[in-house]
Image (cartoon, grey):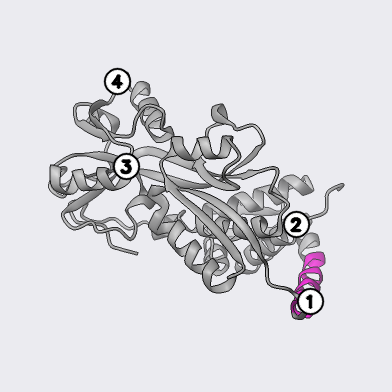
Amino acid sequence: MSRILDLELLQCFQRVAEFRNVTRAAFDLGISQPALTRLIRRLEDEVGTRLLTRAARGVTPTEAGQLLLSKAAPLLAQAHVVGEQLSQWRSALSGDVSLGMPSSLHHAVTLPLVQELRESEPGIRLSVMDGFDAMLHAQLRDGRTDIGVLIHDTERLIEGVDQQPIANDPLMVMAPMNAFPDAGALTIDRLRHLELVLPGVSNSLRQHVDKLFRRRGAIPRIAMEVDSWRLAHDLVTHGNCVTIVPASGVRGRDMDGIGCWPIAGASIFWARCVSRARRDSPVVREVCSRLDRLMHRIERPKSDARSRDRTQSPARP
């Protein structure tokens, strides 16, 4: 094995082995089950062998997994001790970081991230842009933003910017409460005749929606192109309109009179983007670490998915 193993990956593996259950381990670690599954697969890729045997009732370490577990436990314990000993010499982080975030993640990620950094790292001076995809893409491309979150698209990679897929986000139809009585998940066939309020064609979410429709031999009917999350929300609330948003976009917002319905089999992947010129900065690494943790939390484990009357407003987190 030529690579040095990541202690975070070892800790994740240790928790899964202890609980014998990925979902329970994810809850203990404060991340989602899909995110933890990806981390375990990454560790298995690094060591070049399977570490867990998966079954209906949970997981058990393989022989290689047992060996790694026995070696990892003292390493993790020692790392914890060293971290505590060094903390007394830790100086406060200080520096400037520019951050570009999608408007739809305002309540779920951006606001808690900014509040957390203000409280725990006051020396980090944040410059935050809360906007739509095309604007954030341009800011990253032009080097005006250190860290950004975009919809992952391998056809829109930005030179000089590292792009790491980080969280899956289901797509939802947002409409007046009585728009789809007694409906569960909606299909594209159900939506093809509706007039939709969507972002312009340069927006990655719009491009993703267009692809979903094309796969069904259809094109979305556009009532209006709106590159403003707030205006789209208000048009649904006051204008009897219908739009498509990531599930994270409805969390923490006023949903009085609005219903949300999942689109069957439709989701996006968010990617964390970092300027290569700034990626080694301690303050950039700190912001990335906290951003990653919050982004992982928008992926709720499957066990948390509860059926509910889709004509009612979603419960606020």
Q: Residue at x 58, y 66 (%)?
A: 29
Q: Nearer the viewer, mark 2 or mark 3?
A: 3
Disc nearer the start of the sequence (2/3): 2
Label 2, label 1: how far apart the Cα atoms are: 19 Å
Q: Residue at x 33, y 43 (%)?
A: 245
Kind of element beneath mark 1: helix
Q: Residue at x 29, y 21 (%)?
A: 219
Query: In what quadrant of the picture does the C terminus appear?
Result: bottom left
Q: Where does the image place residue 192, in percent across and percent down from the top left? A: 24, 27
Q: Are marks 2 and 1 in contact (CB under 8 Å)?
A: no
Q: Is residue 297 left or right of residue 248?
A: right
Please state which amino acid type lies under the numbered disc 2: Asp
Disc nearer the start of the sequence (1/4): 1
Label 4, label 3: how far apart the Cα atoms are: 25 Å
**Magenta stretch: dominant SS?**
helix
Q: Is residue 169 left or right of residue 124?
A: left
Q: Residues within 10 Å of mark 4 (few under 14, many from 20)?
A: some
Q: Is residue 215 left or right of residue 308?
A: right
Please state which amino acid type lies under the numbered disc 3: Ser
Q: Nearer the viewer, residue 150 or 119?
A: 119
Query: Which residue corresponds to mark 1?
Result: 86
Q: Are marks 4 and 3 in contact (CB under 8 Å)?
A: no
Q: Residues within 10 Å of mark 1 (few under 14, many from 20)?
A: few
Magenta region, residue range: 70-87
- For residue 6, the mark is 2
- Which corner quadrant of the image does residue 108 belong to? bottom left
Any magenta on residue 75?
Answer: yes
- For residue 228, the mark is 3
Q: Nearer the viewer, mark 4 or mark 3?
A: 3
